[in-house]
Image (cartoon, rainbow, N blue to C red):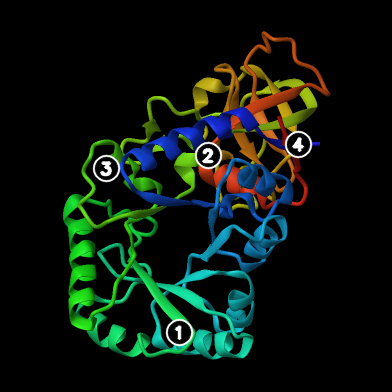
Amino acid sequence: MAYIKMKRESLKHNYDFLQDLFQSNNLHWGAVSKLMCGNELFLKELIDLGVREVHDSRISNLKKIKDINTEVQTVYIKPPAKEAVEDIISYADVSMNTEYYTLKLLSDEAVKQDKLHKAIIMIETGDLREGVMGEHLIDFYSKVFELPKIEIIGIGTNLNCLHGVMPSQDKLIQLSLYKQIIELKFNRKIPWVSGGTSVTIPLIINKQIPQGVNHFRVGETLYFGANLFEDKLIPGMKDDVFEFGAQIIEITEKPMLPIGELGANPQGDVMEVDSALYGKTHYRAILDVGLLDLDPKYIMPMEDDYEVVGASSDMLVLDLEKNKANLKVGDVLRFRLKYMGALQLLNSDYIEKRIE
């Protein structure tokens, strides 16, 4: 059976690195857990590190966090859907919001449950995903401050997740200025200015975070040690928290080119034939995993002489060239993962989850 494995020591190493980074810069942060897709085995590992604030975009995952440890502060990180309001008040201590209509629903439900619910108002700063437009911010705040059982604890922004707009000092200064304007206008304190996600980590390392921005949500860098500005590993961090393995179910020397009239495969792709490969053969291995579980572009073989050829719904095909390692049926090939690959595998019920 194919598996995805989390390496406990590598995760702890990255967590300690980030904890030191944020503490030394007097910043607050929470761990984003949505990558784990609610897997309780992995969520418990995260909580056992000492994480006391967890962010997720699925309310069912936050419920599992509360089942593991009620003391962890849970943050719902997308504008809530109407149908989710009751559960959000039940299981999320904080939610990120952009619509007065939704905040009014949250307020009504919080009154019903007699619970104080905290809210962060997300502000649009250029990536054009969620966020209140800056020119509407004062009017927006003038209404939401009056809602019973709702405590506005912060403003925030999201960058890079849709159109790839990168964070900058100017954008974070803009966010900090919005906080000052709101505090002066309404004589209310805004404790959190949530400056973004993993993509902001290089700005923190380079001491480029403006005064006033004091909170961040971190997922990808925690799990992959990634510098998302430069698409490389941050020095001192690890990129092997997750490993993927799949078993060989067939291995045979075959022609390098298909034989017969070519049409589109089930994914709609038509192969381009390199005539120089006619008559040549390589060993091909089929693994017990397929497109149902992940997109092959998000995995990287740990051996240089393996190449992913393609995949169907349930099988992944590799070119092993001359099979110098003398691999056979039943052997397991290991892969490194990109973020989206780990996300897909963790979301698949057909993939075994392991802890090392």
Residue at the spot of label 1: 103
| Percent of width and height locating residue 213 | 27, 56
Up/down of 155 relative to 199, above or below? below
Who comes first in sequence, dot 1 or dot 2? Answer: 1
Disc assigned to residue 223: 2
Q: Nearer the viewer, mark 4 or mark 2?
A: 2
Residue at the spot of label 3: 203
Label 2: which secondary element: helix
Label 3: which secondary element: helix
Who comes first in sequence, dot 1 or dot 4? Answer: 4
Which amino acid type is shown beneath numbered disc 4?
Ala
Residue toward you, 187 or 59: 187
Q: Residues within 10 Å of mark 4 (few under 14, many from 20)?
A: many
Cβ atoms under marks 3 and 1 closer than 8 Å: no
Q: Residues within 10 Å of mark 2 (few under 14, many from 20)?
A: many
Which amino acid type is shown beneath numbered disc 3?
Leu
| Percent of width and height locating residue 174 | 18, 63
Who comes first in sequence, dot 4 or dot 2? Answer: 4
Q: CA distance from mark 3 to mark 2?
A: 19 Å
Q: Residues within 10 Å of mark 3 (few under 14, many from 20)?
A: some
Which amino acid type is shown beneath numbered disc 2?
Tyr
Residue at the spot of label 4: 2
Disc assigned to residue 326: none
Cβ atoms under marks 4 and 3 closer than 8 Å: no
Who comes first in sequence, dot 4 or dot 3? Answer: 4
Q: CA distance from mark 1 to mark 4?
A: 43 Å
